Image (spheres, grey):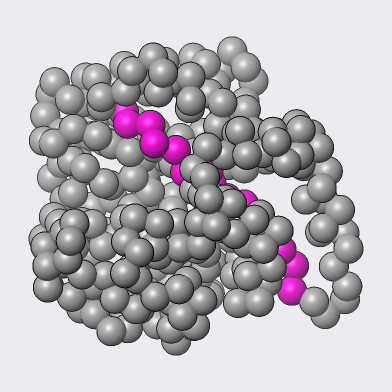
Amino acid sequence: MAALRRGFSTLGCPDLSLEEVLEWGRRFSIDAVELRSLAGTTDLPAHFAGQYGSPEALAEHLARRRTAVKAGEAPDPRIVALGTSFRLVGAGPGDRDALLAQALWADGLGVPWLRVFDGGRDADAVELAEAAASLAWWREERRSRGWTVDLMVETHDSLLDSVRLARAAERLPGLGILWDAHHTWRKGGEDPLVTWAAIGPRVVHVHVKDSIAVPSGRHPFTYVLPGRGDFPIGPLSETLQRAAFAGVVSLEWERLWHPYLPPLEDALEAARTWLV
């Protein structure tokens, strides 16, 4: 079976610069990174503009880094997603403007995905109609601007089991899924293999993390280092490999939101033998 493409989110190292993130990826032989925070901010367009000036300049900088890699050295991980705060249900005009600002940079860098949230609570007819309107607006903007970057929706707020995801598939055809396998398992109460069987063909990216059933400050569970919790990573990893999953399986170490977590370095070290 082919090895999975491994990644991590900068939620786990929110104060690092882009260059430091890429170096960490090389150090841990990571294939891809998703950017949510850099240098202490989640306003990536403003940060990029201040540091690099334009998408073209940043793209040239990243290309120079890639060509400078010597024979035998690990290459920089690819930037495969920018994480946004946009919700398909509940977004306002300001949220749309912020999404377009992210899209401008993502497309200019050749980043394939913008992460958006589902939003809502129930994935009922009313919520899915709003989500469909948001998606139609995005697709028209994307078409008119000639962008290749696209949206992937995270299973975060309402899309927490295969029944709700099936309703969404009917109402939102063609929308890629960022499957947070921990959310559908811990919050939705569904075996990951059941969820995968229902949504596998639509999944373009996967988030994994580990936890125990002990309440924390924000959740009825507590995140722990990979391999120290209850998440069934073994069966999931084997299933994804058998399916020849072509997307990235990304460790979403949420240290930005949960400062009690150990450093990302510890999580990546633990994940070497946990996610294989």
Q: Residue at x 57, y 39 (%)?
A: 44
User: Eyeballing the image, is 270 above or below 236?
Assistant: below
Residue 86 in magenta stretch:
yes
The residue that appears at 45% across and 56% down in the rendered structure is: 11
Residue extent of the magenta highlight: 74-88
| Image coords of residue 136 (percent x, y) | 39, 17
| Residue 104 located left or right of residue 66 | left
Q: Residue at x 61, y 33 (%)?
A: 46
Residue 267 included in the magenta stretch of the image: no
Tell me which residue sits at (59%, 13%) in the image. 144
Would residue 191 be seen by someone viewing this image from the given angle? no
- The image quadrant of residue 129 is top left
User: Which quadrant of the structure image shows residue 69?
Assistant: bottom right
Nearer the observer, 203 or 158: 158
Q: Nearer the viewer, residue 189 or 87?
A: 87
User: In the depicted view, which residue is nearer to us: 130 or 49?
Assistant: 49
Q: Position of residue 18 (x, y in %)?
A: 66, 54
